[in-house]
Image (cartoon, helix red, strand yellow):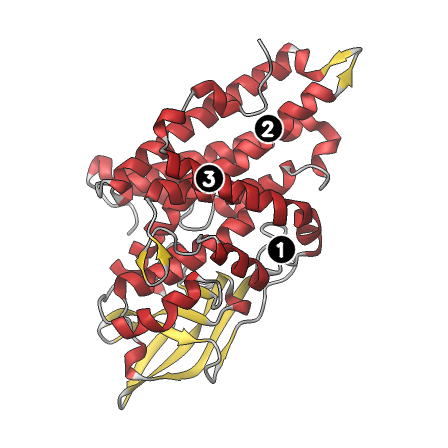
Amino acid sequence: MSPTTNPLDLFDLDDQVGEEEHAIQRTVRELMDAQVRPHLAQWYDEAKLPARDLALELGKVGLLGMHLEGYGCAGTSATAYGLACLELEAADAGIRSLVSVQGSLAMFAIWKHGSEEQKQEWLPRMAAGEAIGCFGLTEPDAGSDPASMRTRAKQDGTDWVLNGSKMWITNGSIADVAVVWAQTEEGIRGFVVPTDSDGFSAPEIKRKLSLRASVTSELVLDDVRLPADAVLPDVTGLRGPLSCLTEARFGIIFGSLGSARDCLETALRYAGERDLFGRKLASFQLTQAKLADMTVELGKAMLLALHLGRLKDAGRITSTQVSIGKLNNVREAIAIARECRTILGAAGITLEHPVLRHANNLESVLTYEGTSEVHQLVIGQALTGESAFR
């Protein structure tokens, strides 16, 4: 039997993916190989990302908001979007986060809940990568409990005035538009905030040990005055931001497997080349046991992702099912990344290999868009009918 460097080949999943979806996946992989992978170690080491230039390249191939219909968006299947996220994160989770926040949070919020004027103003430019968006929900004291947000929006005549702050916001410092959620007298509302508005600032968060090839920021709103038509008109309450988070979590179900696959492929190559005690590292039983167990978990997670993709394409997916996918696949991906590091030994801690970079990134992926504990409680509530949140 000849060795394989793609562990998913053992599962013979080609029939589960259509030719157009395969073509999209290949396009993303080729783009990452040509324009991203050669620079990732430097971007991660220096904690810098040429996000604006990269967004334009991603826009050229239709990756931004690709699963949305109209307004310059490609209108692909959900499964195709998931496979694109897989290839993006196989390069780096920071790159996938750029695309996810742009398309599944900022663009989706406007596409799903915005006025026609808001859609026309922002979505075509965002799809092209000419305008970058961010999504302001999380706060320093309101992460897993967004209902406790302190950001306020008050009406002053026909205007709205926003005050508050948001934390851990991907794309914040480079964004042209922020979708900001705030408490109002009517409940939580979303606002489309041009980032050149007076009183808006977005200081970048430095000294990160995870997602270093990504722009992460705080948003500060100090008497930001907006016209009446800045509010998202079609939603009130937590239903709005949570619908966007469900979209983004779906991309993570696939994206996390990109990190895991890249780690496992790296470990396979390394084990096949590394000589130890006069033989290849790959020939040792303990090494093969690790590789076999990781391959089984990766394949199971991929089957789950494809199943959820088809449910989403059929319009039947539930938020609980998305929680199942996010909980399982990120948890397995980070376990695979850590185990692959052990196969690489000391070499695994350097940026010569992507394994510890992926593992560090997955520490953030494990937390954002709902921590593992939150998803456990979502699933627990579905099983028992009892809420453990309050």
Q: Which residue position holds label 3? A: 25
Q: Residue furthest bottom?
A: 157
Please, is residue 213 above or below residue 24 in the view? below
Secondary structure under the numbered disc 1 in the rendered image:
loop
Q: CA distance from mark 2 to mark 3?
A: 17 Å
Residue 108 image point, x, y percent: 34, 59
| Mark 3 element type | helix
> In the image, is residue 3 above or below residue 109?
above
Q: Quadrant of residue 352?
A: top right
Dot 3: within a 10 Å radius of its alpha carbon, few (fewer than 14), some, or many (20 or more) residues? many
Is residue 36 visible to the viewer in this orientation of the structure? no
Establish if 390 lies above or below 118. Answer: above
Q: Nearer the viewer, mark 1 or mark 3?
A: 3
Nearest to viewer (mark 2 / mark 1): 2
CA gap, disc 2 and disc 1: 26 Å
Q: Amino acid at mark 2?
A: Glu
The residue pinned by badge 1 equals 208
Q: Nearer the viewer, residue 15 or 169?
A: 15
Q: Circles 2 and 1: CB distance less than 8 Å? A: no
Q: Residues within 10 Å of mark 1 (few under 14, many from 20)?
A: few
Instruction: Look at 40% across and 26% down and name the residue there.
Output: 14
Mark in the foreground, 2 or 3: 3
The amino acid marked with disc number 3 is Gln
268 up-or-down from 136: above or below: above
First reached walking from the N terminus: tag 2 or tag 1: 1
Check disc 2 and report the residue beneath it.
Answer: 265
Q: Are marks 2 and 3 in contact (CB under 8 Å)?
A: no
Task: State which quadrant residue 229 falls in.
Answer: bottom left
Q: Amino acid at mark 1?
A: Lys
| Residue drawn at the location 37% of the way across and 44% of the way down | 250
